Image (cartoon, rainbow, N blue to C red):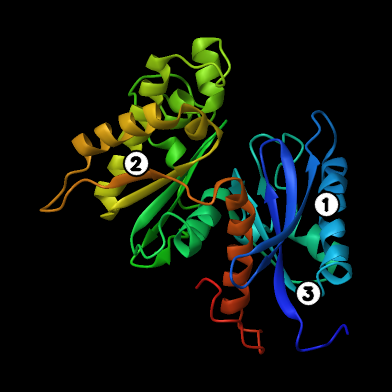
Amino acid sequence: MANDPRRRDVILAVDIGEATFSAGLVTARGELIDRATAEIEPDVGPQSHFAALASAVLAQRDRASDQHDVRIRAIGVACSGEIERSCVTVSPWHISAWRSFPLSEHLRDLIGLPVYGDLDAKALALAEGWLGAARGARSFGAVIVANGISGGFVVDGELLDGRTGNSGHIGHVIVEPGGRRCRCGARGCLDAEASGAAVEVITGRSVDEPTYDIMRRTGRLVGRAAGMVCSALDLDLIVVGGRVADQFAATFFNAAQEEIDVVARVGHGVAARVTPTRLGVHGPLIGAGAVGWRGVRRSSATRVAVPSESPT
């Protein structure tokens, strides 16, 4: 059965989240057919973190054959923070023990399959363009507003990678000149002014207990940064997800749209539209799956046809 050509292929998707490591199985149609999670423990070493992730990954590997009778083609990874292209090394800001951690090598040694990786918001952009709120759009952005803020941008149907693969760090667009000091060293970055971590420092309150004013302010600042990127890249849609955006809901999105309307009217077009993600809690793993399918399709070593439903 191991080489049965009738078996469906899947990507073993891995998401390095803020509170959990997640792994799942994503088909070429974007179906998330299984998932497992492991908590990210504070104050442990790099190998202990990987052991937790490995437990979820190995559980999905076993369930792929034992429960679903599918074949894993590759591993797809979505990770926050700075990365070396395809997650050869990762430095998630919230996992202090992982600084230039060789994640791809560890996963390849664990499973014995190719590993393709990307930033979390870039992965989300692939997912939302494939099956979500940006389906059918050619030029759009995806922004994650959580404890940190990140972005991924698609222009004329192509995800922007940048020189090192780190394109999209919208959290370091300056929205309040001379404002709060950011962890990058600059002042007034979006991440330092509107992330979940920043909101809690500024207000002394959890993002689960926001005031109306802080929800409006956060939305305006995200809209300001997004609007500037829309003007620079000629985008017409911004899809926003993440814990803070989800928690602040309509108040946040209305304020973000008002700010985009002010700062992003260029040429003869209308301002870009901002909308919540459509894939919800499944978006990160579907995004990691999309990264994996994209890598398989683009790999020059691939000789077996990839199903046409997978993202380009």
- The residue at which mark 2 appears reads as 226
- The residue at which mark 3 appears reads as 70
Front residue of 98 and 4:
4
Q: Amino acid at mark 3?
A: Val
Task: Tell me, yes or no, whether the two marked residues, 2 and 1, touch with CB atoms within 8 Å.
Answer: no
Residue 220 image offset from top left, x and y in percent: 33, 28
In terms of secondary structure, where does tag 3 sit? strand
Disc 3 to disc 2, C-alpha distance: 40 Å
Locate residue 66: give its quadrant: bottom right
Q: Dot 1, how many residues are within 10 Å of its Cα: few (below 14), some (14-19), or many (20+)?
A: many
31 over 245 or under it: above or below: below
Q: Residue at x 66, y 89 (%)?
A: 303
In terms of secondary structure, where does tag 2 sit? helix
Q: Amino acid at mark 2?
A: Ala
From the viewer's perspective, is 231 left or right of 162?
Answer: left
Q: Nearer the viewer, mark 3 or mark 2?
A: 3
- The residue at which mark 1 appears reads as 56
